[in-house]
Image: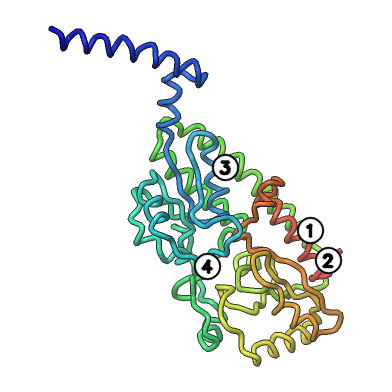
Amino acid sequence: MNQSRVALAAIATLIPLAMIATVYTGRPALQDRQEQEKITVVASFYPLYEFASRVVGDRAEVSSLVPAGVEPHDWEPTAEDVSRGRTADVLVINGAGFERWADDMQAKVVANTSEGIEFNYREEKEADDDEQGHEDAGGGGVNPHIWLDPMLAKHQIDKIRDVMASSDPANTDYYNQNADRFTAELDSLDAFIRSELADCNKSDFIAFHDAFTHFSERYGLRQHSIHGVSPEGEILPQTIQQIIELANGFGINVIYSEDLIDSRLADTIANEIPNGKVLVLSPIEGIGNDEQAAGIRYIDKMKQNIANLKEGLECS
């Protein structure tokens, strides 16, 4: 009997405390439960983080494995990163061999955004890259930098939309609307690029690494690069000389560097060509904290690229 009285007294104490907690937080318990029930999405690196964020809106929590401002090609997950990937409801990856660690993460659901794309070519520089010691991050000559082609980015958005609708069917309409809105922006970006590059004196450019293969194929350009599909690795002196000769042969005076890479190699080459200069052509593989704080996003970075590319291609 005494035990029953003690239990009732405890309950009577807990109920007011719970009410006080609700008043203090300003949120009803139901809202807390709804927030806790948001599904978690982990993206591999920046472009996939933004694409996923645009699709899920406020219906899921999205984070990126590769930290802001970190070059993702040679990034390796820590034990904590592996745990995040395994416990997330959805892991969003680029695929095409870019995330070599993805299979080991054993995620619950994987949105492989390159799945379904037909890669019907092999890396033109594969033999040269092997001689220079570059690692083929794409696997078998496939170039994984699909997000730099707005039309292939649309494919990635569709893949994220499909996986989110399957994982969270109650919000399917919401995900569809968000995806449709962003793909419309990508269509506008494609039209903008075609207009800006419609009247150029040159079609050849030298990128820091082989990130713009799909972009170049889409817009009728010819990319040459200092590095292979990864911006890391040793560059031999004869390779530097070959790039200098190539620039002179095509009358190229702009050497493109990247925002996450030391520009000294590009500077060295630019100093050896007439009127040489270095501009940034970002592969948008990461974005700095300052850019995020300024509200700069994927489409902004693409438009910055086009402005710098126009200068190198001598577009009107």
Q: Which mark is residue 196?
A: 1
Task: Please provide percent x and percent y for residue 83.
Answer: 37, 52
Q: Which quarter of the rendering shows the N terminus?
A: top left
Circles 2 and 3, Cβ within 8 Å, touching? The answer is no
The residue pinned by badge 4 equals: 73
Which amino acid is tagged 3? Arg
Q: How many discs appear?
A: 4
In the rendered view, does 245 fall on the left or right side of 41? right
Which amino acid is tagged 4? His
Q: In terms of secondary structure, where does tag 3 sit?
A: helix
**Local crowd size for mark 2, using a 10 Å CA cut-off: few (<14), some (14–19), many (≥20):** some
Circles 1 and 3, Cβ within 8 Å, touching? The answer is no
The residue pinned by badge 3 equals: 54
Rounded to the nearest angstrom, the CA distance separating label 1 from label 3 is 26 Å
Quarter-of-image position of residue 263: bottom right
Asked if 107 appears above or below 134 in the picture, the reply is above
Task: Please provide percent x and percent y for residue 274.
Answer: 85, 84
The residue pinned by badge 2 equals: 315
Residue nearer the viewer, 243 or 62: 62
Please state which of the two labelled residues, at mark 2 or mark 4, is closer to the viewer: 4
Farthest residue toward the bottom?
Answer: 238
Rounded to the nearest angstrom, the CA distance separating label 2 from label 4 is 32 Å
Circles 2 and 4, Cβ within 8 Å, touching? The answer is no
Asked if 24 appears above or below 160 in the picture, the reply is above
Q: Residue at x 40, y 54 (%)?
A: 80
Task: Please report whichever mark, 2 or 4, sits nearer to the chain's N-terminal start.
Answer: 4
Task: Please provide percent x and percent y for residue 180.
Answer: 58, 40
Asked if 308 appears above or below 84 in the picture, the reply is below
